[in-house]
Amino acid sequence: MKNINIHNIDFIWSSRKEYFSLKPLYDESKKYKINTRLLRVHKSKIRNYLKISNLSSNVVISHDNPLKRIKKMGWNGKYIYVEHGLGAMKYYTYKYSFFHNADLLFYPGEVFKRKMEALNPKFKNGLLGGYPRMDELYNAKIDKQKLCTKYNLKPDEPIILFAPSWGGKYSKNSGINNISFFKNIKNLLVVPHPADYGVAKKTAAIIPEKNENINQFIKLADIVISEVSSVAAEACLLDKQVIQLILNKFPGCFPEKDKRKDESWIKNEILKNENSIDRSQRPFKIPYIDEDWILGHSCTPENVEETIKTALKEKEKYSKNRKHWAEQSCWGFDGKICERMIMMIISYLETGAPKQIECLGLKQDNS
């Protein structure tokens, strides 16, 4: 165990997605001499009262909801932000003040750093960290035969995973609602966004339980189909083929209207420019930077069946794209993401200043 001074820090969450993003970091923190807790912050002030009364002055968040809730109850400490996915297409990444006011912010990958630099070149509290859940993806081993038996899949035929982003509750053309175009696709497994499970259960698709870990299904699949979900980038980390669905609007992406009431941190000139982009020509243009998030074959939902056939014939066509966006979306995919991030958090707690730890040559000292 590391011989360092003891610090207090709480990992706080309000949704399952945040929980799964922070838990690997929390588990890693137990290897060091720091007092840590993993706490759910509820909407109810009464349910939060006992927790908040002794909350650490340092917290780690993966969304601003728990931060808002504790601040309403009088907490006034320092917070560290950890991203809860690898999707580079969402407009809300670094759009709001809480990102720029973070005492320490971890970029999942280089593309996120470029987005911040385009919006706020003066921001000095950001470090490359990676995405904590990807350590598990890196190390995970699956029993293919067992999973195929459980979900009635044929192990000797290509396995197709459809894992859309959220939006099914708001639009019939978004998210899980596009399952209607998959009715003739064989060996199909569907994993909805957690927010869309209610909609998904009304379909006839093979859908794992909500608490099942999607990493095992990414490992199992031969082709991963999504649109702007983090899952598409996660598939690239394993060099899995990706098909991106082209929709008229992607949830949480330009030119969709922002559903949040929070004031935008970004200058109106930048937002105006983003809304002027012709998305019919550049459906996967990344907000705030002049890059396109093209990971593999793409098609409209109506053409997904034919595109699967094409992708199976052209397995290496987008191999360079997969490699590029795997590296750009998740920094340091080597099974040691949590180790580095905890060490950078400890360094920040001790010095009060962000310090980058590089990914090569790092050795953990458990003495």
Image (cartoon, rainbow, N blue to C red):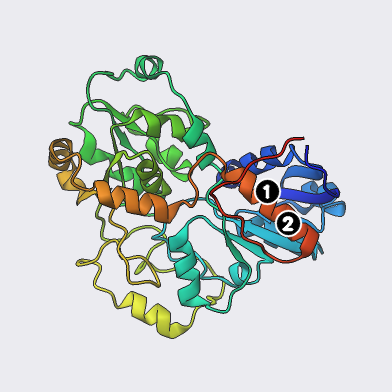
Left or right: 202 in relation to 86: left
Q: Which residue is mark 1?
A: 342
Q: Residue at x 52, y 66 (%)?
A: 260
Query: Residue type at mark 1?
Result: Ile
Q: Nearer the viewer, residue 355 or 148?
A: 355
Q: Nearer the viewer, residue 174 or 52?
A: 52
Query: Viewed as shown, does residue 113 lie left or right of 316?
Result: right
Q: Position of residue 126 (x, y in %)?
A: 59, 65
Secondary structure of the residue carrying numbered label 2: helix
Q: Is residue 352 above or below residue 148?
A: below
Q: CA distance from mark 2 to mark 1?
A: 8 Å
Residue under label 2: 347
In the figure, residue 217 lies in which quadrant? top left
Image coordinates for residue 290, horizontal then vertical, percent: 33, 72
Name the residue: 35% across, 44% down: 236
Q: Position of residue 198 (x, y in %)?
A: 44, 38
